[in-house]
Amino acid sequence: MKVEQISIFLENKAGRLAEVTRTLAEAGINIRALSLADTSDFGILRLIVTDIEQAKTALKDKGFTVGRTTVVAVEVADNPGGLNHILDLLSKEGVNVEYMYAFVQQSGKNAILIFRFDRTDQAIEALQKHGIPIVPGEKIYNI
């Protein structure tokens, strides 16, 4: 039910993001989803990739600081209110969303939301209780 994500800490300077994508491309690793957040000094690039261990090794070999985090992928109808429905039920269950990002495979169908929760297991239980589809990591890695 959980998805593994890597986080890379980047200096906020021209070309640094390209170094990450070049490193992954040279290692034959595909990026399935990503989020980039920045401050004036550094950024955090969060990635879901086809091979987490190989990505970590390749990036560390190039001097990047890489972490690994567990997130949850949730499928939601790609229409107005789809996200709100999930956030409302999580709020009622007392689950906090630390951050999230999304991607759509085909417009008008379903979106996949990637969530980082304060209490992952409680969030999974709440989503399952309400019939919200959780996408397993293997499916996300192979999209």
Image (cartoon, rainbow, N blue to C red):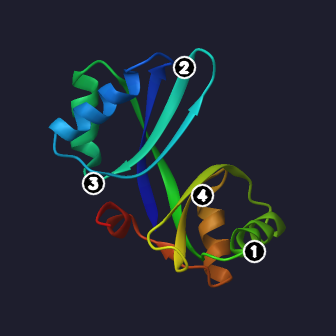
Placement of 120 over or under 124, stated as above or below: above
Q: CA gap, disc 1 to disc 4? A: 23 Å
- Which label belongs to residue 50? 3
> Across the whole image, how many numbered discs are drawn on residues?
4
- Left of 138 or right of it: where is 101? right
Q: Residues within 10 Å of mark 2 (few under 14, many from 20)?
A: few
| Point 59% across, 62% down: residue | 121
Q: Secondary structure at mark 2?
A: strand
Hey, what amino acid is under mark 1? Answer: Gly
Q: Which one is earlier in the sequence, the residue at label 3 or at label 2?
A: 2
Which element carries disc 1, helix, strand or loop? loop
Label 4: which residue?
120
Q: Label 1: which residue? A: 81
Q: Residue at 52% across / 31% down in the picture?
A: 44
Closer to the chain start, of discs 1 and 3, is: 3
Which one is in front in this view, the residue at disc 1 or the one at disc 3?
1
Q: Amino acid at mark 3?
A: Thr
Pointer 4: residues within 10 angstroms few (<14), some, or many (20+)?
A: some
Q: Which residue is mark 2?
A: 42
Q: Nearer the viewer, mark 1 or mark 4?
A: 1
What is the spatial separation of the Cα atoms under label 4 and label 2, in whole angstroms?
Answer: 27 Å
The residues bearing labels 1 and 2 have C-alpha atoms spaced at a distance of 34 Å
**Toward the viewer: 117 or 80?**
80
| Structural distance between the alpha carbons of marks 3 and 4 | 22 Å
Q: Earlier in the sequence, mark 3 or mark 4?
A: 3
Taking the image as shown, residue 99 lies to the left or right of residue 11, namely: right
